[in-house]
Image (cartoon, rainbow, N blue to C red):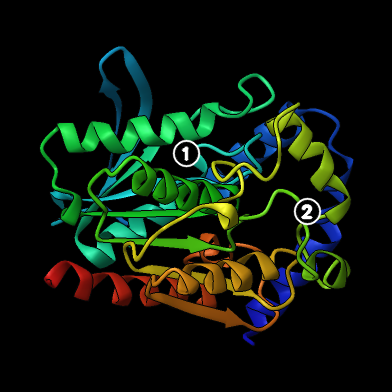
Amino acid sequence: MSLRLHLLNGLLRVFEKPKLARAKSPDELRKPFETKARLFFPSPRKTKYKDDELRVGEKMVPAHWAITKNASKDLVILYFHGGGYVFGSPSTHRAMLARLSAMTGMAACLPDYRLAPEHPFPAAINDAVTAYRALLERGIPADRIIMGGDSAGGGLVLALLGEITRQSLPQPVGVFALSPLTDLTFSGESFGQNKQSDVMLPAERAVDMTQMYLQDHAADDPRASPIKAQFFKGTPVYLIASDSEILLDDTRRMTRHLRSQGVSVTEKIVHNHPHVWPIFQRFLPEADQGLRDIAAWIKPLLSR
């Protein structure tokens, strides 16, 4: 463990976790995250950002692109940000995706999917399907698309893979998820066992966040909890999580579920890292290494 990781864990435990626990409204979660992202998540030099609209017929999802120098615009990382389906945006995650764009030579597309409670389930998964179909309709082949996401966005991208399979759409070349939220029933043992060791996520807020997102919908719907989805020997998947976070078992059980259906899964569990640690790129050595590991996994898939 680096000194910076030790310091970051302490700062998150003392400052960030209590703030997440105390927040009483979506705005109290959204505005501080946007501000911190601008201040603390630097982008690579010569990164180009642009807004876009992903359309399929009358359906439209706003999106934001992060493209670094020498990135190919017909190789796309379709990435869904985290934030419990309530906060977060392409702006909060674009610097991390710009770094991954530089490492892989791919353009990163971040859909600005609708958030709860203003837009409850199934708005997010419907927007995810629209975004993927829009890229296909633009002429970007599925075998030149990598999909990714973190936390709730990691659950969303895995739910999208389930929908791609269910709807018999062309499969992307690979999917990666960082500390994904895959079970909205929160039945994994780590949810209770890691309540104290998780330096960022307050377990007591999970029910509130889920109610804002699902409202009256069933938590075990495969489009909400991809651990219930069917995949049938689908595209390769890369999953990472920390052994100290409450969502650890969401990754471990998702790995077992995918492998039981013939999916090739690379799982990496690290020790005592914060939730979605790669977002702290450029500050945290472990974050930079996490992004390099993802890029190393992606490149052989594209070379096929």
Comparing 37 with 78, the one in front is 78
Q: Is residue 112 visible?
A: no
Quadrant where the N terminus lies?
Answer: bottom right
Q: Which residue is mark 2?
A: 16
SS label for mark 2: helix
Q: In the image, is residue 193 above or below residue 80?
A: below
Residue 98 image offset from top left, x and y in percent: 34, 53
For the point 52% across and 54% down, the residue is 154
For the point 43% across and 56% down, the residue is 96
CA separation in Å, label 2 and label 1: 19 Å
Q: Which residue is mark 1?
A: 91
Residue 10 image offset from top left, x and y in percent: 79, 70
Position of 138 with respect to 165 (left or right) is: left
Q: Earlier in the sequence, mark 2 or mark 1?
A: 2
Where residue 221 sits, quadrant-wise, is top right
Q: In the image, is residue 279 above or below residue 300?
A: above
Position of 23 with respect to 78 (left or right) is: right
Position of 256 with respect to 140 (left or right) is: right
Dot 2 alpha-carbon crowd within 10 angstroms: few under 14, some 14 to 19, many 20 or more: some
Number of numbered markers: 2
Residue 84 image offset from top left, x and y in percent: 66, 43
Residue 165 image offset from top left, x and y in percent: 35, 49
For the point 69% across and 38% down, the residue is 32
